[in-house]
Amino acid sequence: MLGVIITLSQIVNNESVILRLAAQRGFRIHIRKPDVQSSQIAALVDPEMAASYSVHYHPKVAEQSGCGLHCRGDQIEIFRRLLPPDTSISCSCHSWEEVEQCQGADYVFISPIFDSISKSGYRSGFDYEEIASRLTDKKTKVIALGGITHTNIPKVKALGFDGWASLGSVWELDNQGNVDIEKSIERLNKLTMESFVKLQYITRKNTTEEVLSESLAVLKGGCRWIQLRMKDADHQTIVETGRQLVELCHRYGAIFLINDSPQTALEVGADGVHLGKSDMPIEQARIIMGNKIIGATANTAEDIVNAYNKGADYIGLGPFRFTNTKKNLSPILGLERISNIVSSVREQNIMIPIVTIGGINLDDCPDIVRSGVNGIAISGAIGDCSDPENMTAQFLNSMKE
């Protein structure tokens, strides 16, 4: 699915930090600022990732910067002639009739699908049965806008949309009216997990140098989610490694988690923590972690429901098969049981992201993806191979929908 981040309408300090991070993760950026000069708009377009940006109201900026243009539906044909042929052109719609009139666009927004977060009183008037029916016969990509949060993105996908766009669930401002970078990143992390993070790499080594080396390789291979797991290292080594690894991950726009310890996660500045079944209770970890990511290990549907109800953000479901990476292994699940567990949970309308873990090889990926999980977690299959960068790329390619 295409994920779109829309800017605030005014110029705000620190905004470009969030925009660049979002672009690195695969989001499309829409710069929508009705009363801002073109020079200020152009300054927000990252030249290294211009193709990931679209601007509203400023066709000259689109032409000169090499980014996309968001325009009115009746302007699509005009700008198709004036702008370079590979320019992404989009527009906004508020009815299915308008969608039909925008066939020349690369994609269209339709809103509000849910009650708006950023516009008070802007309520959805769409019927979900009609949405599903209309999207079955769509002739252009349709993006859901209005009230999008990380909790309803699965519903957007189930309805048949090609993507979603969000404004209100991304941005948080501080007391001075600047973008609160930490809190906005926490919000962006939740949206990232729902849409883009298919592969989590769990580190395999126990020295700082080895962990940084393996992590750099998987980041270069395209992985954007790393969990630091150093079971045989002392606390100080974990902290020193974590502090360096969080900088490396954020340089690549990746989410970074610490295994087992919320306190250590906070100490090193991680984006979150992953908790095993015998670790600190989720509700206690939430008090410590605030709005940061909390993952939880599960072996049954009951485990998932329990973790969801206690506030986990994602599930590590496994083991898929036997693995010597983890001691005290839970019962092996296999493909059929994982598929049944996921179906059982989804039937209860629990749409929490689920990542399969445990002894997974490259050949397993297509079947695992078809089981309904959101992604996979890998350690040995990448960490023990001779070319982890290339193997990471192969895993990501095998999971493409």
Image (cartoon, rainbow, N blue to C red):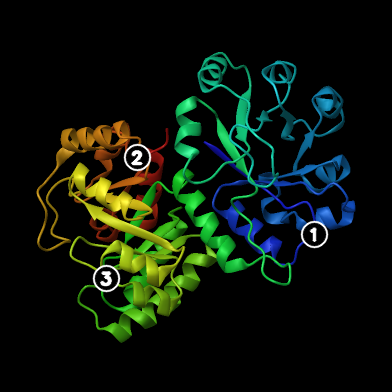
Name the amino acid, label 3.
Lys
The location of residue 187, given as percent across then percent down, is 54, 57
Farthest residue, direction bottom: 236
Residue underneath mark 2: 350
Question: For the residues carrying marks 1 and 2, which lies nearer the camera in this image?
Answer: 2
Q: Residues within 10 Å of mark 2 (few under 14, many from 20)?
A: some
Question: For the residues carrying marks 2 and 3, which lies nearer the camera in this image?
Answer: 2
- For the residue pair 384 and 46, the one nearer the viewer reads as 46
Q: Residue at x 52, y 23 (%)?
A: 128
- For the residue pair 299 and 334, the one nearer the viewer reads as 299
Which quadrant is the C terminus positioned in?
top left
Name the amino acid, label 1.
Ile
Q: Residues within 10 Å of mark 3 (few under 14, many from 20)?
A: many
Q: CA distance from mark 3 to mark 1?
A: 44 Å
Which disc is residue 205 wearing? 3
Q: Residue at x 26, y 70 (%)?
A: 205
Q: CA distance from mark 2 to mark 3?
A: 35 Å
| Vertical relation: 126 (above or below) 353 | above
Q: Are marks 2 and 3 in contact (CB under 8 Å)?
A: no
The location of residue 200, given as percent across then percent down, is 36, 54
Residue underneath mark 1: 11
How many badges with numbers are in the image? 3
Question: For the residues carrying marks 3 and 1, which lies nearer the camera in this image?
Answer: 1
Q: Are marks 3 and 1 in contact (CB under 8 Å)?
A: no
